[in-house]
Image (spheres, coloured by chain):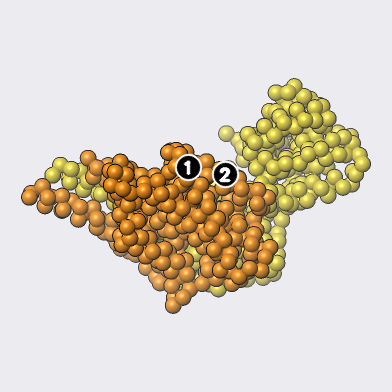
Amino acid sequence: MKKRLLSMILVLAMAASMLMGCTTGTESSSEGSEKTEEKAEKKDGGGYTIGCTVYYMTEFITLMVDGMEKKAKELGCDLVMLDAQNDAQNQITQVENLIAQKVDIIVVAAVDSDAIVPAIEMCEEANIPLVGVNMLINTDQPYHYVGPDDVLAGELEMQHAIDEIGGKGNVVILEGPIGQSAQIQRLEGNMNVLKKYEGKVELLAQQTANWSREEALSLVENWIETFGGKINAVVAQNDEMALGAIQALEAAGVKDKVVVTAVDAIKDGCNAVKEGKLLGTVYQDAALEGQEAVQKAYDVLEGTVTEKKLDYIDMPWITTENVDDLLTTIYAE
Amino acid sequence: MGEKARGFDKKWIQTYMLIFIVIGLGVILSFISSNFLTVTNLLNVVRQIAVNGILAIGMTIVCLTGGIDLSVGSIVAFSGIIAAGLLRDTSYPIIVVVLAAIAVGAVCGLYNGYFVAYWNAAPFVVTLSMMTIARGMTYVYSDGRPISNLRTEFLTIGKGSIAGIPIPTLILAVVFILGSIMLTKLKFGRYVYAVGGNENAAMVSGINVKRIKMMVYVLSGIACGIAAIILTARVSAGLPQAGESYELDAIAATVIGGTSLSGGRGRLWGTIVGAILLGIVNNGLDLLNVSSFYQQIVKGLIILGAILIDSKRNN
């Protein structure tokens, strides 16, 4: 009897836990459906429901989502925010769920540029417009997009690194995960600049460290072993990897002789710039990107934007001179 | 007599409790979200659970022998990338590509099974090794890049329907029926339960325990190959990082379905209901716009609830 009672209690607890999980949503959902009704009446006065699925809640995406929420509120729209947790299949699932939910428009930060292609078709069939954000979509068809100009970012970091070493010497490149749009484009930018210095600047090595500080640390340790003092500049395609490289260079006691540049301008990256360890980094304004994406979604729904094209946000170069602008605003305690 | 009646009563509750929970959850969801109980959405749910359902069927058969297969996610990625590669580089008919993917899964499963059965190595460790090997081979084969632009006929497997029912769901149904026949109607099934219940007794009674233990991993590998086809068709690309942590979802569905991780006890339909439960929770929380952070907590609590009930049942 006692056992049976116990198992019954467990069932209740389980059901309760599920209900609790649901109640959190109940309020927002009933709110949501009220808004949807309102929307039906005044379709042109805002009040749209914007569905969104992002690849993963990284620090960057969290900032971007903040920007999206702020903009959505400003425009009087509802935002349904889903996190695909780096699983391409899960993202397709979420697009299906958003379509079933009859949102007005879907904003996607793709887990994978290829694997998101079916979502375009699904949205077309459901007659729901789609806006890409942050990650390009690998398709020949035009589509709405707001994101970073990663080619420019790649050019900036390489150009500044080469300028700093006096236009000649040896560089190494730390790449993002091979095949991701940011890696492909930043590398394109890196190479655009390198080409101009053929014969003067040599590319000693290029390898992926998968955006990871730890992986970059051991990779650069190995490079220091292999190339000794020949490395003049480390061009990292993101801050995390640059920070790993800096650790390796410091441990080997050669940091003073090597220039490091990066992209992203996350908080740790900015601190490294301020300390003089990182020459500079390209700032991708996550919040601005989120705001622009929601603005674009709104404009598409309002009919003020009809042409499907790629919009790039500004990517400023951050050095000791302007790093405080970031550290005292978005990265202030 | 009283003992027996009580035992039956308890079993009855446990057997059907899961179904009640699923139905109850469905009712609750249809009240709080007007989008849940629509044909489109329910078709979405059954399409969405196909991959995990198929993996969980393989996992259940492995767990019935007291084993575990941690390599399923990686095998899915490996089979999927091979299928995508064949579609890109050759003009083989789709069926050949599908069979190749399944064969890749089976070979990976054979590796697991061989070392678990004939070297008496711990399943946890052997499949962990396959997990990293298969992932590594996936990266080697694909050079870390996705393989896309697959043929349209192939993509139909992921998004097409027959008589209104999504093809992935139909495949899941076929795998489920075949698995059920194997476990309940064939000698193989009896042996699987016997090996999981008491390995020594099974051996004494003349069952080729090693062969059975190897077979279950091969079956799990085959399930991975089938799941890989669906996954690849659904996302229209072979992805090197596909299937990461899918083994955990498969184990979750298995455990929620009432299969004991120590072997010998469990049923395939329980696993399917477990997969449906996870699918509904996932879909419902998406529809309700519940943050994924909470979704993970809810999923964890469900798994805990299931395992607690299981351990109570054992005592």
Residue B141 to residue A327: above or below? below
Which label number is shown at residue B133?
2
- Quarter location, residue A312: bottom right
Along the viewing direction, whichever of B115 and A278 lies nearer the viewer? B115
Q: Amino acid at mark 2?
A: Ile
Whole-angstrom CA distance, mark 2 to mark 1, is: 14 Å
Residue in view at x 38 percent, y 52 percent: B61
The chain displayed orange equals B
Along the viewing direction, whichever of B3 and A242 lies nearer the viewer? B3
Callout in the foreground (2, 1): 1
What chain is tagged by disc 1? Answer: B
- Quarter location, residue B58: bottom left
Can you see residue A108? no
Residue in view at x 38 percent, y 64 percent: B178
Other residues around mark 2 within 10 Å, as few (<14) / some (14–19) / many (≥20): some
**Residue placed under numbered mark 1 in the picture:** B115
Which label number is shown at residue B245?
none
User: Percent from the top left, x then y, of residue B110?
Assistant: 49, 50
